[in-house]
Amino acid sequence: MPCKKCKDGKVKWGNTGECKYDTIKECEEANKDYYEKTTSIVELIIEDTNQELAIDAISLVSAPAIEQDFVFFGKDKHNLTFAKVDEEKRMLVSPALIPNKQIFRYDPNTDSEYYVYFSPDTVRQAAELYLKHNNHHKATYEHQDRVAGVLTVESWIKEGDMDKSKMYGYDLPNGTWFVKMRIDNDDLWQKIKAGELKGLSIEGYFVDKMQKMSETQPTDQEILEALNEIIKEIK
């Protein structure tokens, strides 16, 4: 199991570990032997035939897989992080996907642990398809129940140091996909204010890039080019 944030801000090892570390880095360093054993890193991509399923919804969760909490804005002064945001609008800003960020995964079918990541191109494609297929109004709670009253009102990719994500306190890599969401759902808004919900997690359909490549049949042109290369080497 990876290092996880606790409700008190500390970090624990796995689901049952003690909340005794100050940072994820400290936790990982203390358990580096485990991380050295976990070597499988998988790049996930969007399959051409399932583009409409790439990002089906965004879920509000207590422990976001990308390990970045969202920033929220409300009427209460102690909840206002930035004065430039309208107090009357119940908004949250969060990264949805961070390029090349390794995310821990466990497959119960094979009892295997591994990491996945998304390239900058895949992150951009996912963000575009999310809007193209009108999924900006789809949201879930802890990857379970579909919830109403959650709407993505802004979506953008960070493209430089002057990106507006800096205004919200984020210092993440170029290519990060950010969203701003309006929360009209009273129950969810109270959970956000109480700190029960801390971030976003995407729901979608992705495939293993290497596995997909191994399944792809070469075209006649690719076979011809390969044969020409072999002939050249023989000569």
Image (cartoon, rainbow, N blue to C red):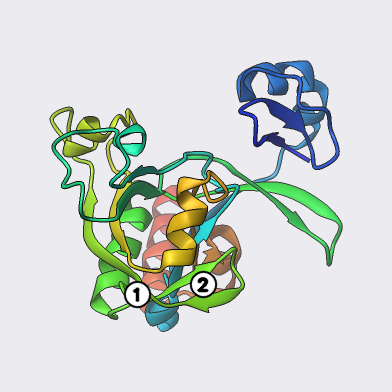
Q: Along the horizontal axis of the image, is 157 left or right of 120? A: left
Q: Residues within 10 Å of mark 2 (few under 14, many from 20)?
A: some
Which residue is drawn at the image coordinates 30% and 49% (left, top)? 178
Considering only order in the chain, which callout, 2 or 1, is on the residue closer to the N terminus? 2
In front of the other: label 1 or label 2?
2
Q: In the image, residue 181 lies at what x, y percent?
A: 30, 59
Q: Quadrant of the N terminus?
A: top right
Element on which disc 2 rests:
loop
Q: Is residue 70 above or below residue 46?
A: above
The residue that mark 1 highlights is 221
Give the quadrant of residue 24.
top right
Q: In the image, residue 54 lies at what x, y percent?
A: 42, 72
Which residue is drawn at the image coordinates 52% and 74% (left, top)? 216
Q: Is residue 99 above or below residue 149?
A: above
Q: Residues within 10 Å of mark 1 (few under 14, many from 20)?
A: few
Q: Are marks 1 and 2 in contact (CB under 8 Å)?
A: no
Q: Along the horizontal axis of the image, is 12 left or right of 197? A: right
Amino acid of disc 1: Gln
Q: Is residue 200 visible?
A: no
Q: In the image, residue 59 lies at what x, y percent?
A: 49, 63
**In-front residue for pair 142/29:** 142
